[in-house]
Each structure stands twice: as structure tokens, then as C-alpha cells.
Image (cartoon, rainbow, N blue to C red):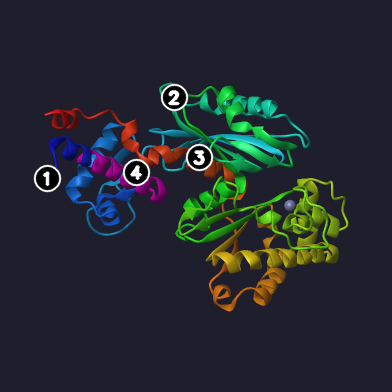
Amino acid sequence: MLMGRDELGHRSETVRRANLSAIVRELHEAGPLSRSDLVARTGLTRSAIRGLIGELVAGGLAAEGPAALDGTPGRPSPVVRTDPHGAVALALEIAVDSLAAATVGLGGRVLDLVRVDLPRGRSSVDDIAEALAGLAASVSDRLPSHQSIVGVGVAVVGVVRRSDGMVSLAPNLGWRDEPLGERLAAALGVDAPITVANEADLAALAEHRRGAARGVDDIVIVWGSVGVGGGLVVDGKALTGSAGYSGEIGHIPVNPDGLPCRCGSIGCLETEVGSTAILRRAGRSPEGGHDALDAVLAAAEAGEPAALAAFAETGRWLGIGLAGVINVLNPELVLLGGRLTASYPFVRASLEAELDRRVLRAARGIVRVVPASLGVDAPLRGAAELAFEPLLNDPAAWLAPRPPMVVLASA
Ligand SMILES: [Zn+2]
């Protein structure tokens, strides 16, 4: 079939944009790469790579320089890397007991991060939006003056509709159907897209891209704090459900005779493995916060029987809940994140024993349960990844328009 010149120009422009996207995504996710690495990873020709890198360097998104001396023989090949100051994302987080803001450069380097305590209890969505705007200003004011924010990602401890950042439920904040996305847009006043997502979903994204699950395409993360969240990556992609509500592992029903859950149901996994349950089993006040949980962890490390028994029972329930998830999804890796990371050594034995009893043999042979590796900032790191998505999908939109293409298309 013959194509007109307009169509041909349009198609080559589409190909150019897709190729730029492939290169920027590789550099963002994998780190510095030689031109040969990029040829191997993208399947593009060496000359195409050279031209596209030239565009990215001219547009400030990438830089090319000598390879680090690593002792390998031969002439070092120049290395291409993202310029962390070439594009900056603003990441915000509303956690159970803190608020955080960070600026993150293309390539994932955290440029600046502030975290402040959030008093427990009810806080209005306007108060929180205002407080976050203050934190956002404090980190973005430290950027060079010419630097603009390419996107804003927000992690929130709640059930979120991604299309508009409507928080359907956030028990820790006392929120139900709160328009967080809309309020943040007004409070921040930035000229960049704002995307809001659940903190555990974003922790899964960060661990998949930069943490313990790097290179693994089927993962489950259980994110524990007062509540228990979950995030899923299936076949390399975040599983969000039709509106963004998926992954609520904490609300899997596990105990029909259990305690009332804050979601309105009874005997959800969260009521058996959340920090309240651990404190109750260890004989401490269930109202205690993170300090109280740290005390139980310290007691377990010292070998205190009540603390060890509390974690063992928690691990058993975690195993019951996860067995169902593993049988449905057949993941390769289950990560314990948030406050559960530190509990891992003490819940491990009973959790694994429960998986041995309940998971289908074929799936059991594959799955490994490991602690997450990015710590408490994983949701914030994931929020930055979310904020970079529009740029990674079409970096050409951030580069200056190219006159030659216009000539070809209008001839
Ligand atoms: Zn529940």
C-alpha cells in the first residue's frame, strides 16, 4: 500500500517518539548504559541510537560521559545516563502518622526529602492538602530556579480512585469519599499532572522497579502498619483493578468469628495481622503506636516468650491470608513491607508453615516470601515513579519541536 507523504511523516514521527520513550525508560529504570547496551536492549540500530541520544542530550534529559573505571580491560565505552536535574518529579505521601514530600530526579535519585509527624486522629482533607503544599514548597524551593516539576505523584494510606484522586476510604484519617486529588490541585497550584494512588500499590511499583523485586514480574507486597494494605504486580504491570481499588489484601476475610474491621466487615486479615493485633497478643495496649510496636520487636529480639508468641500467631494468620492470594495469582515473590519488614524474622516460621499446608504444590514450589528492601520511603519512591509516567511514555513532548519533520509533512 502506498502512503502519502503526510502519512509517512506522521508515521516516522510516531516511531521517533516511541523510540525516544524506549531509550529514556531504559535509562530511567536500569541506570547508566553504554550505547552498545542500548542497542541490545532496544533493538534499534547504532546510528538510530546515536541520533536519539543526541536529541535527549540537547533537550537536557540525558548526558553522555566517560564510563566509570571498573578495571575491565579495553577502551571504556562512553556511558549514557539520565540527567537527574533534566526532569524532576514531586512525590508526596500521606502515611498513617506522617506526611512527606520529596523531589526525585529522572533516573530515580532522591534530590530532597522531608517527613513530618502527623498527629493521630481525624484531619480534614483541606488541612492535609495545605500541610502537603507547605512541604512541597519547602523541597521545590531548593531546586534551581529554571527547574520545573514534570509531574506530581501522591501516595495515600487509603482506597483511591486513580482517575481523579477520590479517596473512598481512609480509616486512619477518618476519611470517606474525600476529593483529595481536587483539593491538592488547588493547594499546590502547580502546572503539572497530579496522580493519587494507594501507598501499598506504590510501594509495589517502587520495589518492582528499584528494590527487592527488581527483575521479577509477578509480585505481591503486603504493606503493614496500623492497617494492612497490599499491592500487586502481574506480568510486569501494576494490577489496579477497574478503578484503582484492587490489592486490598488487608480486607481478605480470614476469620468468620473475628473482630470487627474498620472497613465495616468482620475478621479481615488486618484485624489479625495489623499492629493493633500484635500489641493485643503481646499483652500491650492496642492503642500504642509505632513506639509500642518497636518495644514488642525489641522484646522478641531479646527472646521474650510473649512477644515471640505474638509474632508467631501473627505469622500464622498472615500465612492463611497469603495462601489464598498465592493460589489465585501464582506470584514469584511476596514482599513484607512497611512495619512488617522488621517483623519478618519473627513471623517467618509460622507463615511458611501455613503456606506449606495451604498453597497448591506447584505454586508453593515457586513462591518466595522476603522482606521488602526500600524501607518506609517505598511509597514515596513509587509516587515519583507514577509522576514520571507521562514523561517516560512520551519524552518528545518535553523536548523542543524539530523543524525538519514539519517541512516533510507540509511538502
Ligand atoms: Zn476490613
Confirm or deny contact between disc 2 and disc 4 (CB under 8 A).
Answer: no
Return the disc, 3 or 1, that comes first in the chain's sequence. Answer: 1
Mark 3, residue position: 384
- Would residue 16 be counted in the magenta stretch? yes
Q: Estimate the x, y position of residue 246 in percent, counting from the top left.
A: 59, 51
- State left or right for residue 197 relative to residue 17: right
Q: Residue at x 48, y 43 (%)?
A: 385
Question: Label 3, label 1: how many angstroms apart (C-alpha)?
Answer: 44 Å
Principal SS element in the magenta part? helix
**Badge 3 element:** helix
Characterize the local packing of mark 3: few (<14), some (14-19) or many (20 or more) Cα atoms within 10 angstroms.
many
Mark number, residue 24: 4
The amino acid type found where label 2 is placed reads Pro
Q: Estimate the x, y position of residue 273 in percent, counting from the top left.
A: 74, 58
Q: Residue at x 28, y 45 (%)?
A: 19
**Badge 1 element:** loop
Confirm or deny contact between disc 2 and disc 3 (CB under 8 A).
Answer: no
Return the disc, 2 or 1, that comes first in the chain's sequence. Answer: 1
The amino acid type found where label 3 is placed reads Ala
Return the disc, 2 or 3, that comes first in the chain's sequence. Answer: 2
Mark in front: 2 vs 4: 4
Q: Residue at x 83, y 62 (%)?
A: 257
Mark 1, residue position: 2
